[in-house]
Image (cartoon, rainbow, N blue to C red):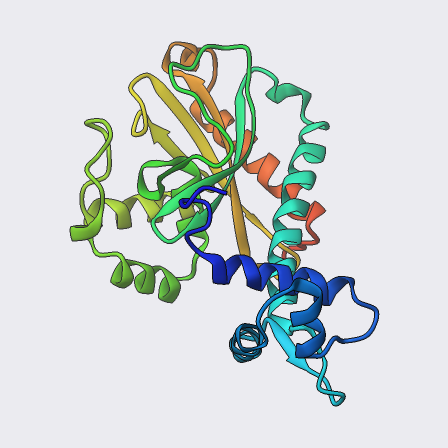
Amino acid sequence: MSKSHDSVPALRRAVRILDLVKSTERPPLAADIARQLELPRSTVHGLVAVMVELGLLEKTVTQGYRLGARLLDWAGGVTERRDLVTEFYQTLESFSDLAAFTVTLTVLEDTEVVYMACRNSATVLGASFRVGMRLPAIFTATGNAMLAEMDDNAFREWLTLHPASTWPEPLTPNGIRSVTTLVREIAEIRERGYAVDDEQIHDGLWCFGAGVKDHSGRMVAGVGLSLPQTELGRYDVSQLGRMAGALAQALSRRLGYRPVQAESV
């Protein structure tokens, strides 16, 4: 094994310990772990102590070790995102009218959107989307749609955590540059129900986005429809926004979201 691959031996040993604990029928003692993995006892005692402290392992009444609850939190997060992607693709199957668009699914992480899924159209966009790609949220339709889904307090907190002085340089001349512009944009998105990227990510590329909610009403993702500016004249802009909104609503329903019905007076 090369030196670069073995630069974090403690982490590799910790993963081996987790694998062993998972595969063992009875919670192994530290001595059992050391013997089976052929590791020094002092090394194992030090590692499992830290892993217990971090919640990766739990010590049983018999002084053995089992997997800790923190791993369940991580597993839940992975499962939730996999479910989101699966539901996204299944929802798309019932939207045959979206075949002409590149359709994307993103999640918000701090100041960026992360692309979780993408179905490309045959139309040449001039830019490409791929799973795992990250872009500044304030320049994207899905990012601004997700920001608009925040309540006022959450949005103010986001602005406090990420002041304009930390924002990246615009990618095109149309990119948002100030808090005033962003606040106005968020207000417009809330009023019309969808967000628009009017060539903020790439010259000649437009995107229409809407936010997705889960069963609890929490904003969890954004969906976007992208098309080249040359194709924009074939559609009414509000129609494209409504199509993005309809997809977001359908995906939200699949995730269990049910909007609260206003009581009649």
Q: Quadrant of residue 205?
A: top left
* Residue sticking out furthest to the left: 165
**Res 230 → quadrant:** top left
Write the residue at 41% across / 46% down. 3
Question: Along the line of sight, which residue is nearer the eye, 75 or 80?
Answer: 75
Is 30 located above or below residue 165 in the figure?
below
Picture layout, residue 10 above or below residue 136 = below
Front-most of 1 and 53?
A: 1
Check the picture and name the quadrant holding the C terminus.
Answer: bottom right
- Residue 45: image location, x then y, percent: 57, 79
The residue lying at 53 percent from left, 73 percent from top is: 43
Residue 108 in percent (x, y) is at 44, 49
Tell me which residue sits at (27%, 50%) in the image: 183
Res. 33 visible in picture: yes
The location of residue 152, given as percent across then percent down, is: 37, 62
Question: Does residue 136 appear to the left or right of 39 in the view shown?
Answer: left
Describe residue 104's horizontal placement relative to residue 259 as left or right: left
Residue 35 position by quadrant: bottom right
Q: Residue at x 72, y 74 (%)?
A: 32
Above or below, 160 relative to 28: above
- Give the residue at the far right of this rendering: 25
In depth, the one of 81 and 140 nearer the eye is: 81
